[in-house]
Amino acid sequence: MLTTLLVVAAAAGARAVPSPDVALHSLVWPPPRSMSVAGEKLPVAPEFSITTTHRGSATLDGAIARFSGLAAKTAATGDASSAGALRELKVTVASADESLGIETDYSYRLTIANGSATASAQTVFGAMYALESFTQLLDEQTGAVLHSSVSIDDVSRSAVCGLARLCQRAQWPPAAVLCTGTRVPVARPND
């Protein structure tokens, strides 16, 4: 199917743009608007948890439960006995509005620095994107976050967007597209 999408994108007259850094942009898919990473892997503690001060949102609570399970499954594969292991991802949401529409704000900021992780978003939907990006940064073999310093700022690219549209807008290097098989988003199928 991915090959078909790439062929369709090429047939649609995709224009060539400078290729993104394959190594950086293959960490999170689709690539966020802004992303920087540095440092060695950061172990994730076995007691790792995702917390929020935003109460009363079944949508966010469900997302936290889902992504906590994914993070715990990955963290269980590694050895996080070091004192500097990541123990918590703190999620903050500015608005209690959970209405979905063409104007819904999906923006988020994810920061991992000095052994702590925070995700902030305007809405619960942006927070869900941040959780998805966080789980994509986990190494499946070691259970660690791939880099000890991460900064991601992202916004929804448009009201209706998908993998085919991303491929039409830019000719991604094959390595960047093909490596997405294990990092395909689970929370935003139509970003």
Image (tube, rainbow, N blue to C red):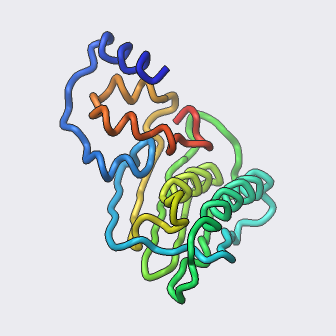
Q: Is residue 152 visible?
A: yes
Residue name at image x 62 percent, y 43 percent: 187
x%, y% of residue 120? 54, 64
Residue name at image x 44 percent, y 49 percent: 28
Look at the picture and state if 50 lies above or below 177: below
x%, y% of residue 147? 40, 68
Look at the picture and state if 66 lies above or below 43: above
Along the line of sight, which residue is nearer the eye, 77 or 185? 77
Please give the count of numbered marks on the rendered protein: 0
Residue at the extreme top of the image, as rendered: 11
Residue name at image x 43 percent, y 16 percent: 4
Along the line of sight, which residue is nearer the eye, 126 or 174? 174
x%, y% of residue 137? 48, 58
In the picture, measured across the screen, residue 170 lies left or right of residue 93, that is left
Residue at the extreme bottom of the image, as rendered: 83
x%, y% of residue 31? 39, 45
Q: Which quadrant holds residue 51?
A: bottom right
Q: Is residue 94 visible?
A: no
Look at the picture and state if 135 lies above or below 159: below
Residue name at image x 50 percent, y 85 percent: 84
In the picture, measured across the screen, residue 70 lies left or right of residue 38, that is right
